[in-house]
Amino acid sequence: MGEVAEQNGNGIPRTVLIVDDDEAIREAMHEFIERFGFMVNEAASAEEALDMLRTAVVDVVVTDIMLPGKDGLNLTDEVRRRYDSDVIVMTGYSGNYSYEEAINKGASDFVFKPVRFEELLLRLKRVLRERGLRQERDRVVKELKTLAITDGLTQLYNSRHFYIQLEVEAGRCTRYNHSLTLLLMDIDHFKNYNDAYGHLEGDKVLVRLSRIIKSCLRQMDSAFRYGGDEFTVLLPETRVEEGKTVAYRIKEAVRAQNFFPLPDEKAVNFTISIGVAQYKAPEEIASFIQRADRAMYASKQEGRNRVSILVA
């Protein structure tokens, strides 16, 4: 075996699919590329290649243009629309097919037949290098987007994303006459705990309670750290009475948790005060939040560890 081929982010050799109806060309190309550490598969037609792509991960498809049935340009177009694979197009008919036509169909590169294998290897490595850079860029962008909307401590969505998502959900309510319920909640006497045991122990409480809140929700619901020891929950397509049920489920789950800030001391339990409000289209977003906030304040005023509803 020759030099080791470039690998993907998981340390797995890159995979190449050769598509050509000439068996001798496929075998010769297969043998040459495989010597450089690539995993190589073959297909004799576009249809066979698409069948393989449905079940296999392929980094680069190397395809002839002239194929039985669907031609290589149509294959290229379909691969780039449906699969995460780059395509190198081969042709011996330089007068009939242009570089621009192949690139416009989504090809990453273009080589003429008879193919010099050394040239193909260089082009393959270049395509894979650009592919790796593109994947790394996409990964970084995705991570940055996640960081921008996520609270660093609790890993819930942050308050900035809360306002964005609330605008989106309120818009759906207005357009489609859907229901939307908001829960606004605050941990009771949390400042006393922080003062007694320190902020590091307080952070541990926030992390655990965030997980508890999230565990009480459906997949379509969203939980947010609103600020400090306050949390919000958006319940799409949920009326206020259903939201009240969710609020009680969260309240009881929080109350059942035991915390041990100091060794050999009795457990500390927390309670949570929750305000519940249903969106009344087309009210202002600020008014909607204020109703939930007033409901939460009512829970505090009435003795804490309560769920209160404020109807518009």
Image (tube, grey):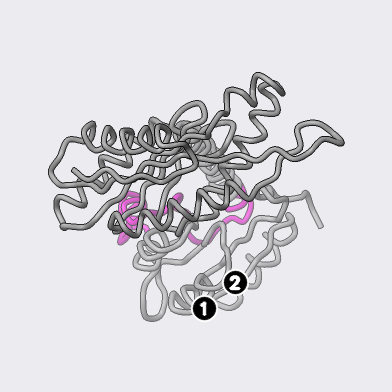
- Residue at the spot 65% in from the left edge and 50% down from the top edge: 8
- Residue at the spot 56% in from the left edge and 31% down from the top edge: 152
Image position of 45 with respect to 217: above or below: below
Label 2: how many residues lie within 10 Å, few (<14), some (14-19) or many (20+)?
some
Q: Is residue 146 visible?
A: yes
Front-most of 173 and 144?
173
- 118 is within the stretch colored magenta: yes
Residue 26 — which label? 2
Residue 160 locus on image (x, y percent): 38, 30
Front-most of 235 and 148?
235
The residue positioned farthest toward the right in the image shown: 264
Which residue type does callout 2 highlight? Arg
Residue 44 — which label? 1
Residue 168 position by quadrant: top left
Q: Quadrant of the N terminus?
A: bottom right
Identify the mark nearer the N-term, 1 or 2.
2
Image position of 194 with respect to 249: above or below: above
Marks 1 & 2, CB-CB < 8 Å contact: yes
Residue 147 locus on image (x, y percent): 51, 33
Residue 107 locus on image (x, y percent): 41, 54
Left or right? Give the position of 176 relative to 139: left
In the image, the segment drawn in magenta is 94-122
Residue 140 locus on image (x, y percent): 53, 35
Residue 59 position by quadrant: bottom right
Q: Nearer the viewer, mark 1 or mark 2?
A: 1
- Residue at the spot 61% in from the left edge and 76% down from the top edge: 24
- Residue at the spot 74% in from the left edge and 40% down from the top edge: 267
Left or right? Give the position of 158 relative to 204: left
